[in-house]
Image (tube, helix red, strand yellow):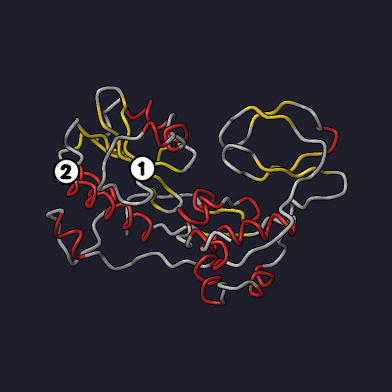
């Protein structure tokens, strides 16, 4: 059906390790509910079964089914493929979509990676600049607002920044990242809309899956805390208290705290949205 083969681990996320950003960007959960889920799993220390979540407001059997057993697209996005000058009635290979999107938007090329920078697919394949880019994807995705180019039309979650003599467009695509490299001035409302549509198609074909890892349970001999930069939940033996370590996700240097930290109170999505 497609020319891209992804290992299941590239698309799977442990619920007990998901951050608010993961819930929002990867699983497309609204921000208020994402914060609610994040606070609940911190307070619970470890969610053992998804059925536990059904007691939370906003979580249904249908939403759990979508998160745990997502369905991959088997039919083409006719409108997108037609806009890329591809046959609309036949599911085009993903490599062909990226190649066509690059040509239509006059991009130097594009790159598809996992969220940790593992390269899946790139166009054109001979561009050595992508080797450096792939290695720096996590760092680029953590750029501050001050580093972003001023684009009033930039869609939510998409990032635009500078990379050498080019402009770099990041579009979250579920468990993957889609990156387009364009010459200065080539990023405009039309190209943004195009790459957002391509990113949506990537996610539709390769939807993320959430699971529960019951091997990472916090015991009385462990300390659990969040990385202050990327908010990844870290569990480590108490023997590591006061040690300096690097976050497994964003690599920031941090010190293991004396005790487990958690959020002491819950708020409903409605309260969070209202700023209560």
Disc 2 target residue: 105
The C terminus sits in image quarter: bottom right
Gap in Å between the C-alphas at discs 1 and 2?
Answer: 16 Å
Q: Nearer the viewer, residue 150 or 143?
A: 150
206 or 140, which is in the foreground?
140
Q: Position of residue 55 (x, y in %)?
A: 66, 75
What quarter of the picture does the N terminus occupy?
Answer: bottom left
Residue 106 placed where, x, y %?
15, 39
For marks 1 and 2, give the one nearer the viewer: 2
Q: Is residue 59 left or right of residue 51?
A: left
Q: Residue at x 52, y 71 (%)?
A: 63
When the figure is inspected, residue 65 is found, relative to residue 187, above or below; the finding is: below
Q: Residue at x 82, y 36 (%)?
A: 258
Could you tell whether 192 is left or right of 175 in the image?
left
Residue sitting farthest toward the right: 220
Dot 1 or dot 2: first in sequence order is: 2
Q: Nearer the viewer, residue 256 or 81?
A: 256
Q: Residues within 10 Å of mark 1 (few under 14, many from 20)?
A: many
Residue 113 occupies which quadrant of the picture? top left
> Residue 67: x, y in percent?
52, 65
Tell me the SS state at disc 1.
strand
Q: Secondary structure at mark 2?
A: loop
Q: Which residue is most to the bottom?
A: 61
- The residue positioned 47% from the left and 36% from the top of the image is 142
Q: Which mark is residue 255?
A: none
- Residue displayed at 82% across by 43% down: 222
In the displayed image of the protein, which residue is found farthest to the left? 85
The residue beneath circle 1 is 112
Left or right of 178 on screen, residue 208: right
């Amino acid at each position: 059906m497609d020319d891209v083969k992804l290992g299941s681990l590239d698309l799977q996320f442990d619920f007990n390790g998901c951050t608010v950003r993961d819930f929002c960007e990867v699983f497309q959960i609204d921000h208020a509910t994402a914060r609610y889920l994040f606070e609940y799993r911190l307070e619970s220390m470890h969610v053992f079964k998804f059925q536990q979540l059904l007691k939370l407001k906003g979580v249904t059997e249908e939403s759990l089914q979508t998160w745990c057993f997502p369905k991959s697209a088997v039919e083409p996005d006719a409108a997108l493929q037609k806009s890329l000058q591809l046959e609309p009635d036949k599911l085009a290979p993903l490599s062909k979509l990226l190649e066509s999107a690059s040509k239509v938007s006059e991009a130097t090329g594009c790159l598809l990676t996992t969220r940790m920078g593992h390269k899946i697919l790139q166009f054109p394949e001979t561009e050595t600049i992508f080797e450096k880019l792939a290695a720096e994807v996590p760092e680029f995705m953590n750029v501050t607002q001050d580093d972003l180019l001023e684009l009033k039309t930039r869609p939510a979650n998409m990032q635009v920044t500078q990379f050498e003599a080019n402009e770099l467009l990041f579009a979250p695509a579920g468990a993957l990242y889609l990156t387009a490299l364009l010459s200065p001035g080539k990023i405009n409302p039309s190209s943004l809309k195009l790459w957002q549509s391509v990113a949506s198609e990537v996610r539709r074909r390769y939807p993320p899956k959430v699971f529960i890892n019951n091997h990472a349970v916090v015991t009385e001999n462990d300390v659990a805390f969040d990385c202050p930069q990327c908010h990844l939940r870290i569990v480590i033996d108490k023997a590591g208290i006061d040690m300096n370590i690097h976050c497994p996700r964003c690599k920031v240097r941090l010190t293991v705290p004396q005790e487990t930290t958690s959020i002491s109170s819950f708020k409903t999505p409605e309260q969070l949205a209202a700023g209560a």
